[in-house]
Image (spheres, rainbow, N blue to C red):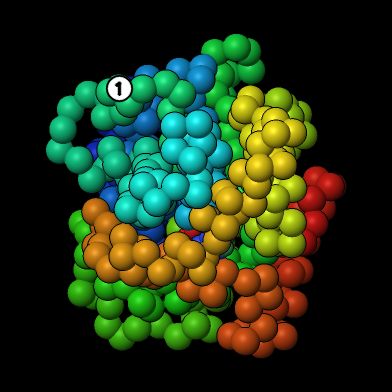
Amino acid sequence: TSVHRKGSAMDMAELIPTLPLETGCPPFLLRQYGGYWQPEWVLPGFEAVNTRFQPRPSDVFLASFPKSGTTWLKALAFATVNRAEHPPSGDAHPLRRSGPHDCVKFVESTFALSDEDGDLFAALPSPRLLATHIPYSLLPEHITADDDSGCRIVYICRDPKDAFVSTWFFTKNNKVKVAGSTELLQHPAPSIEQVFDLFCDGRSVSGPQWHHVREYWEESQRRPNKVLFLRYEEMLREPARNVKKLAEFLGCPFTAEEVAAGVVDAIVDLCSIDQLKKLQANNTGVTDLAVKNETFFRKGLAGDWSNHISSEMASRLDRVVEDALRGSGLTF
Ligand code: A3P
């Protein structure tokens, strides 16, 4: 990881072919970098975040392990931060015309997919809302700085069994074609059991999941003013309470008048999966990565894993995660 932390020890393009490779996890070739498995095509984006991106102390990063509720968090944070300019109940709200992923971009994939030079986020006005799947330990030090120059981070964490099942359907329902995604990887399609084996070995996009969540969890304990740790299942149970927590953390708490006027409830409603699913921006079209927008909105439940993996598979993953999280104070 010297390239990441120190900048230019070795060019990422030279480094990539030397990294451990996993080809059994479609649709991407995965490479192990800094202890995490990543799609090969995204790694130049990691480097760009380190070398080209200029963080501002007012930046807010929405961070997650994939398929853990990122889309929802993007919508909630966007609606909360912009509620003065864009009242959530208004017909013209940007989230009624654009998908959450258009409103808040992933930094590393934006860099990885663009041919343009320089800092692609420089033109965005402050405070900027940005998203990432980059593991905490691989974020540039200027983002995680433990002083006033560091950025705020909101992490969303989900039961790994549901994140796995969500990934399975997302992959099945998309035929993603980018550099590094080859025909070889599409045929024959692996079974859910095969992909699950790899997941339990940490071999999934941004895996191991348990390292990803643990790093952000520990940082949220160490620096609660800079890292907020949210849980998908708790958000489903008490969305309004979590939106209030989010607003406080972001420095824009709801006033008593706003709460009484139903602003929190309007944000929860605007960002609910049922509302978002109905919108044309979310049920048609594809993203930059040829991902079908509709595939970001499936069931949105806690515990759907039990319909798709056996209880033996579930206990196996539970044991792996429990062992890895021991001593952290974080449990599922
Ligand atoms: P399921 O596949 O279990 O339904 P991500 O946004 O990180 O890619 O995660 C996708 C998961 O979040 C999917 O889970 C998806 O249905 C769910 N999701 C998307 N929008 C949501 C929303 N507004 N509320 C709750 N869950 C949502």
Categorize mark 1 by other alpha carbons within 10 Å: few (<14), some (14-19), many (20+): some
> In the drawing, does residue 49 fall left or right of residue 151?
left
> Would you place residue 160 above or below residue 59 in this image?
below
On the image, the x and y values in percent for residue 154 come to: 60, 39
> Residue placed at 55% from the left, 39% from the top?
80
Q: Is residue 241 visible?
A: yes
Q: Which residue is mark 1?
A: 122
On the image, the x and y values in percent for residue 155 come to: 61, 43
- In the picture as drawn, the residue positioned furthest to the top comes out as 148
> In the drawing, does residue 97 fall left or right of residue 322?
left
SS class, disc 1: loop
> Would you place residue 291 above or below residue 316 in this image?
above
* Three-letter code, disc 1: Ala
> Residue placed at 72% from the left, 85% from the top?
311
On the image, the x and y values in percent for residue 201 come to: 58, 65
Q: Is residue 26 visible?
A: no
- Is the distance from the Cβ of mark 1 to the nearest ligand 1 atom less than 8 Å? no
> Would you place residue 14 above or below residue 36 in this image?
above
> Residue placed at 62% from the left, 72% from the top?
301
On the image, the x and y values in percent for residue 245 come to: 71, 39
